[in-house]
């Protein structure tokens, strides 16, 4: 069994899956479905359709699938491996099929970096398999960098949005639930000018208060709720009903 090349390919698929730094990604049902489909395809007799593709050729092109390896350079190297001569179309269409199977397409944002790395390694005399593996490492690092940058942009956007909502609240304008800086409470103001405050409790619930000002800590309690969503439903009803003079 260990001599079967499919064993090593399935092992590679599983190894690449668990390399993800995100436990949530590893457990994601859609990701697991994709992995299962890849394993089933690998265990099937895939060589019937792609009879020019030996295990060595197929393993290399799968590694090259998410990167930007020049097609003619890749074809030239593959034709140096055992097997029938490959045309440019053979390589292009096999590459496309692998990308579709594994849902692994090159990221256009990484194209320039991949091309530069390929040219540099090629001029140094690095062998094609080593270049392909180096490109894979480069892509993993760049994808991590892009994720971090995206998360940072999202945090900046959220902070800018929070500051804008805070300014609306402080200026007396209507606004949805807004958390002022350095406080655990949330405030909202309805169209009729009524202001409400949500305060967290020790048992992870929320108490709803009707307040006269943002610094009012003595407003009457209108109810206790499991989450802000429940409180929002209550406010949307009571905000336009007559209220007692507290």
Image (tube, helix red, strand yellow):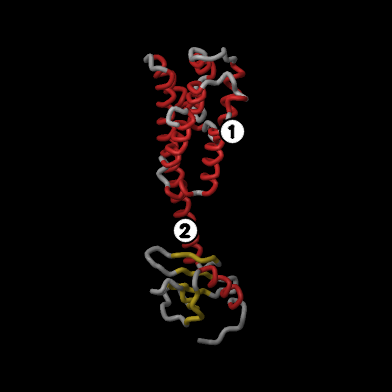
Residue at coordinates 46% horizontally, 32% vertically from top-left? 7
Secondary structure category for the residue under label 2: helix
**Quadrant where the N terminus lies?**
top left
Q: Position of residue 144 (x, y in %)?
A: 42, 39
104, above or below 232, in the image: above
Q: Position of residue 92 (x, y in %)?
A: 59, 22
Q: Residue furthest front?
A: 1
Q: CA distance from mark 2 to mark 1?
A: 41 Å
128, above or below 157, in the image: above
Residue at coordinates 61% horizontally, 83% vertically from top-left? 242
The reply, left or right, for residue 5 in relation to residue 232 is: left
Q: Residue furthest bottom?
A: 245
The front one of 73 and 182 is: 73
Mark 1 packing: few (<14 Cα in 10 Å), some, or many (20+)? Answer: few
Camera-nearest label, 2 or 1 = 1
Determine which residue is flagged by label 1: 100
The front one of 242 and 48 is: 48
The front one of 194 and 49 is: 49
Q: Position of residue 227 (x, y in %)?
A: 50, 69
Determine which residue is flagged by label 2: 162
Mark 2 packing: few (<14 Cα in 10 Å), some, or many (20+)? Answer: some
């Amino acid at each position: 069994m260990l001599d079967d090349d499919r064993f090593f390919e399935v092992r590679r698929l599983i190894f690449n899956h668990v390399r993800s730094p995100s436990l949530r990604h590893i457990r994601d049902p859609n990701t697991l479905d994709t992995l299962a489909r890849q394993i089933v395809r690998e265990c099937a007799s895939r060589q019937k359709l792609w009879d020019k593709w030996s295990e060595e050729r197929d393993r290399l092109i799968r590694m090259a699938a998410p990167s930007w390896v020049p097609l003619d350079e890749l074809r030239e190297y593959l034709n140096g491996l055992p097997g029938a001569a490959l045309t440019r179309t053979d390589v292009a269409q096999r590459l496309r099929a692998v990308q579709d199977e594994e849902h692994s397409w090159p990221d256009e944002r990484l194209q320039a970096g991949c091309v530069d790395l390929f040219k540099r390694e090629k001029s140094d005399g690095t062998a094609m398999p080593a270049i392909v593996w180096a490109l894979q490492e480069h892509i993993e690092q760049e994808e991590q960098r892009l994720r971090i940058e995206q998360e940072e942009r999202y945090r900046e956007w959220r902070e800018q949005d929070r500051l804008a909502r805070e300014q609306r609240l402080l200026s007396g304008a209507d606004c949805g639930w807004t958390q002022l800086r350095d406080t655990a409470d949330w405030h909202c103001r309805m169209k009729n000018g009524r202001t409400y405050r949500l305060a967290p409790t020790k048992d992870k619930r929320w108490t709803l208060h009707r307040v006269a000002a943002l610094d009012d800590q003595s407003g009457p309690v209108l109810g206790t709720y499991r989450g802000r969503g429940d409180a929002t439903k209550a406010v949307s009803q009571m905000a336009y009903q007559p209220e007692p003079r507290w």
